[in-house]
Amino acid sequence: MLIVEDEDLKRIECIFNGIMNLIICRCCDLAIAAEHIVVHVNGKHGIRCSEELARSIISKYQPESLDAIIAFKNITKELELPVDGIPIKKGYRCLICRHCVRLWSLMTDHFTKKHKGQNVREMTEEGVEMQLLFGGRLRKWFPLLESGTESIDEQNDDAWTAVQSILATEKQRTMKNSKNKEDNVRLINGFIIRTRWDILTESEDKKKLIEMAAVAKEKDPCRGIMDLCQNYFEGIADNMRTGDVLLLRKINSEGLMLLEKLG
């Protein structure tokens, strides 16, 4: 059950998304909390909806409550997949705090209030696909996660040729969006890493690989090296999460140079 639109839902101009458990208003393309169905369709759109009809819809579909929607909004940074029933738009994303808006004027206003002194053009990503799931005080644009899951033929004798083609396509797309600014690309992603690992380990003994990849025991001399590396990369991750944009740009730039050398 993905999208449902029965007679009761048609009467109030709504649909039900069975994946997200959301009632979505077709008049404004926004999700409605279960408690707000009557108030929304009556007050916003002048559509007659009795309390009895609303209770019937809630009993049948068990849509998300206001508390559940607030929790989702607070913990969700990106959408792994688009939410069916909600339009996909393109807008701008702040590279410092990941805040998303539809209009450039709103992004400049955001920098004035939150990041005064920063270069708004260099610190903004444009052409980001996003969805507005909720309105009112819950209003927030959610960017779609860039999956990078472009497929290649499993029987391809030269898998790296396909990988290089994907990298070239991604670089061209990013260059077009950045309008000749410094590249802000994320070419090293999970797909490329997994593909390279599969190619390198295709003819290796699986048991031996498992032993080599096992976590070192506490008394193993390698354990200290492992802990040191873990702390090092956790420190980098913490800096990136707290908005160290210069560090992020340096990593992206060096990663791009490395991939170009490999190509």
Image (spheres, rainbow, N blue to C red):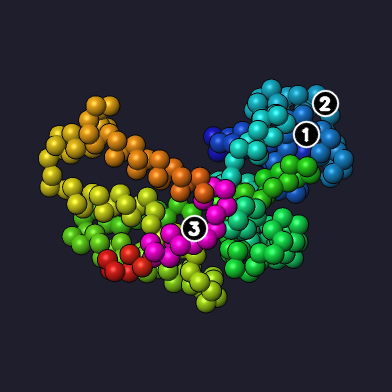
Percent of width and height locating residue 112: 75, 61
Circle 2 residue: 51
Percent of width and height locating residue 77: 59, 45
Secondary structure of the residue carrying numbered label 1: helix
| Residue visible at 50% across and 71% down in the picture | 182
Is the C-beta separation of discs 3 and 1 under 8 Å?
no
| Residue visible at 63% across and 36% down in the picture | 72
Q: Quadrant of residue 17?
A: top right
Q: Is residue 106 left or right of residue 198?
A: right
Residue 159 shown in magenta: no
Rendered image: mark on residue 24: none
Q: Earlier in the sequence, mark 3 or mark 1?
A: 1
Residue 249 shown in magenta: yes
Circle 3 residue: 247
* Front residue of this view, candidates 68 and 120: 120
Question: Residues under labels 3 and 1: Cα distance?
Answer: 46 Å
Percent of width and height locating residue 175: 48, 72
Which label lies toward us, 3 or 1?
3
Vertical relation: 240 (above or below) 231: below
Q: Is residue 112 left or right of residue 46?
A: left
Circle 1 residue: 37
Q: Earlier in the sequence, mark 1 or mark 2?
A: 1
Can residue 47 be seen in this snapshot? yes
The stretch of residues the image draws in magenta is 240-256
Under mark 2, the amino acid is Glu
Secondary structure of the residue carrying numbered label 2: helix
Q: Quadrant of residue 32?
A: top right
